[in-house]
Amino acid sequence: MQVPLYQAKAEFFRMLGHPVRIRVLELLQDGPMPVRDLLAAIDVERSNLSQQLAVLRRSGIVSAVREADTVVYALAGPDVADLMRAARRILTELLAGQRDLLEELREADTADGGATSGRVA
Amino acid sequence: MQVPLYQAKAEFFRMLGHPVRIRVLELLQDGPMPVRDLLAAIDVERSNLSQQLAVLRRSGIVSAVREADTVVYALAGPDVADLMRAARRILTELLAGQRDLLEELREADTADGGATSGRVA
DNA sequence: TGCCTATGTGAAAAATTCTTCAATTGATGG
DNA sequence: CCATCAATTGAAGAATTTTTCACATAGGCA
C-alpha cells in the first residue's frame, strides 16, 4: 500500500466534502445519535443518508453500534471539533472576502476598480 | 444566492480534496512561491497545475500576483496552517486506527475477534 | 514588430462521486 | 414462522470533477 501523505490528506478532505456528511459530523459533536434522529434532522432520503454514513464509517471518522432495533452513530475521536473550528475560521474569512469583493463591484459603477486577488490574466 | 452554511463548508472541504491542491497549500505555507517552483516541486503537468491553481484562486484561499514574467502565489490568509494542523491530528488518529485494525486482523487467524468499528450489519 | 518563455483557458474525454430504487439483513412482536 | 420496522447494500443512471490538448495571452527582449 503506502499511500503518500498528501494523498491521504486529499482523501480525508474529500470525505468531508458533502453537505450531508458535514451535517452528520456537526450533529454528532453534541454526542452520539441514532440514525432515526439524524434522519429527522437532515432532510435527506433514508437510503442516501445510509450511503453517506457508510462513507464516514469507511474513513473511520465515526463508529456505529447497534442498540436494540436502532443503530447509534458517534464520532470516533474528539478532535473533529477542532477541525471544524479551524475550517469555520477560514471559511468566515473567505466569505467576508467575497462580500467585500461584491461591494467593490457594486460601487465600481463608475471608474474601473482593479481585481483584489481573483483572476490574474 | 444565500448558500446554507453546511453547503459552503462542504464546498470548502471539497476544494481541499485534491492531492495537487493540498501540496500547493503546503508549499505556500513556507511563503509565496512562483508557479515555476511549484511546478518543479509537484510532479504534475503544467496545464493541470494551472487548472488546480485556478480552483484555489476561485475559492479565494490563495492570491496570485504577476511579477515581471512569472506569477507568484501566496496564501490569502494565515489560518490555513491551523486547519492543516487540525487535519493532520485527526488523520494521524485515523491512520493509527487502521494500523491497529490491520494488526488485529493479522492476529485473528485463530479465534474470531469482533469488529472494532467498521461494518455494522 | 516578431519571437520566446511563462502561464492560463476552453472544451472534450475519462474518471469519480451522487442519487435513487429495489432488494436484503437484523431485531422484535404476534 | 411471518410481518414489520430500522437500516444497509448493490447497481444503474445522472451529475460533477479531473485530465489532457490545442490554443490564447502577457511580458521581455532582439
Image (tube, coloured by chain):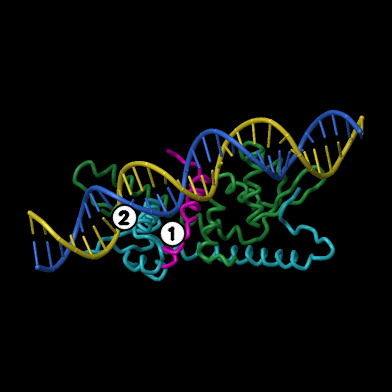
Chain colours: A cyan, B green, C blue, D yellow
Report the chain holding disc 2: B
Residue at point 46% right, 53% down? A15
Please, what secondary structure does the residue beneath circle 2 have?
A: loop
Q: What percent of the width, then of the height, locates residue C11?
A: 63, 39
Rendered image quadrant of residue A43: bottom left
Using a 10 Å C-alpha cutoff, classify the residue at mark 1 as few (fewer than 14 neighbours), some (14 to 19) or many (20 or more): many
**Residue drawn at (30%, 64%), measured in percent from left and top?**
A72
Q: At 77% across and 43% down in the image, what residue appears?
A: B70
- Amino acid type, residue under disc 1 in the picture: Arg
Nearer the observer, D17 or B33: D17
Give the residue type at disc 2: Ser
User: Is C3 placed above or below A17 here?
Assistant: above
- Chain of residue at mark 1: A
**Residue nearest the observer in this picture, A116 or B92:** A116
Q: Quadrant of residue A107?
A: bottom right
Q: Position of residue A39 (x, y in %)?
A: 36, 65
Residue A68 visible here: no
Mark 1 vs mark 2, CA separation in Å: 18 Å
The numbered dot on residue B93 is none
Name the quarter where the N terminus of chain A is drawn. top left
How many marks can you see? 2
Q: Where D23 falls versus B77 (above or below)?
A: above
Q: How packed is label 2: few (under 14 Cα within 10 Å), some, or many (20 or more)?
A: some
What is the x, y in percent for residue B121?
A: 26, 53
Residue labelled with disc 2: B117
What is the magenta segment's predominant secondary structure?
Answer: helix
Q: Position of residue B60 (x, y in %)?
A: 65, 57
Residue C14 lies, with reference to residue A119, above or below; the image says above
Q: Which residue is mark 1?
A: A21
Span shown in magenta: A1-27
Look at the image and tell me whether residue A57 can be seen: yes
Q: Along the line of sight, which residue is nearer the eye, A66 or B91?
A: A66
